[in-house]
Image (tube, grey):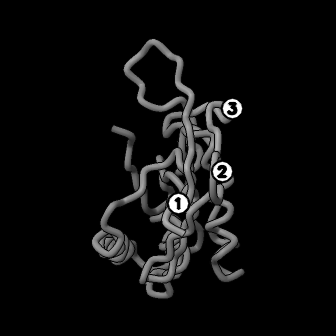
C-alpha cells in the first residue's frame, strides 16, 4: 500500500491557524487512525495526523538518547509540552536512567489517546512510571512537586 492514510482537516476559522484541532474537524478517508513509529532506542509512539512528526527519525532518536543521558539515575521527571510523549516514554524505558517517575503534559487535548497507546507499548514496569495529563505548563506546575528534572519544549 502506497499511502498510510488520507485525512481532511476542516478549518473554517478566519485566522492564520493552519489546523483546526477540534476532534470533529478531522475526517479520515483512508487507512489507519495512527502511525506507530518505533525508535532504535526502544520507545514507540503513536502518531495521529494532528501531531508533528520528526522527518529524520534516526537523527531525532539521537536527540532522545542525548536528553536521556542528561537525566541522572533515579530522577523524578516532569515534562511540559510533551506531545505524544517521545522523550518521556523513552526516559521511562531507559535502564540507564531508571527514573522513579515521569509526569508528562501537553495543552493539546487530543494527545491523551496517542500517549496512552505509546505507554501501553512499554514494558509494564516502565508503564507504571510514566503518566500524562492535559494542561499548559502554568496549569500543571503542580506536577513539578518533588521533581528533580524538568523538561520543557514549548510550542512554537
Q: Name the residue carrying label 3.
A: 24
Picture coordinates of residue 1 (x, y %)?
Answer: 54, 69
Rounded to the nearest whole Å, what is the CA distance between mark 1 and mark 2? 10 Å
Q: Earlier in the sequence, mark 2 or mark 3?
A: 3
- Say which element carries label 1: loop
Picture coordinates of residue 99 (x, y %)?
Answer: 53, 75
Q: Is residue 48 above or below residue 95?
A: above
Rounded to the nearest whole Å, what is the CA distance between mark 2 and mark 3? 16 Å
Q: Nearer the viewer, residue 103 or 110?
A: 110
Q: Name the residue carrying label 2.
A: 112
Q: Is residue 97 above or below residue 64?
A: below
Q: Residue at x 62, y 37 (%)?
A: 26
Q: Name the residue carrying label 1.
A: 85
- Say which element carries label 2: helix
Residue neighbourhood size for the residue with mark 1, other residues' Cα within 10 Å, grouped as few (<14), some (14–19), many (≥20) = many
Rounded to the nearest whole Å, what is the CA distance between mark 3 and mark 1? 23 Å
Amino acid at each position: 500500500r502506497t499511502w498510510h492514510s488520507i485525512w481532511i482537516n476542516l478549518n473554517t476559522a478566519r485566522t492564520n491557524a493552519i489546523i483546526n484541532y477540534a476532534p470533529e474537524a478531522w475526517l479520515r478517508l483512508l487507512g489507519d487512525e495512527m502511525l506507530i513509529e518505533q525508535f532504535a532506542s526502544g520507545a514507540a509512539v503513536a502518531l495521529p495526523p494532528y501531531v508533528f512528526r520528526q522527518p529524520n527519525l534516526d537523527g531525532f532518536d539521537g536527540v532522545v538518547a542525548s536528553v536521556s543521558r542528561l537525566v541522572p539515575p533515579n530522577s523524578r521527571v516532569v515534562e511540559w509540552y510533551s506531545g505524544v510523549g517521545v522523550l518521556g516514554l523513552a526516559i521511562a524505558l531507559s535502564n540507564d536512567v531508571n527514573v522513579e517517575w515521569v509526569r508528562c503534559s501537553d495543552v493539546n487535548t487530543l494527545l491523551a489517546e496517542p500517549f496512552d497507546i505509546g505507554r501501553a507499548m512499554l514494558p509494564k514496569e516502565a508503564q507504571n512510571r510514566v503518566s500524562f495529563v492535559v494542561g499548559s505548563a502554568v496549569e500543571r506546575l503542580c506536577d513539578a512537586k518533588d521533581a528533580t528534572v524538568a523538561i520543557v519544549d514549548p510550542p512554537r
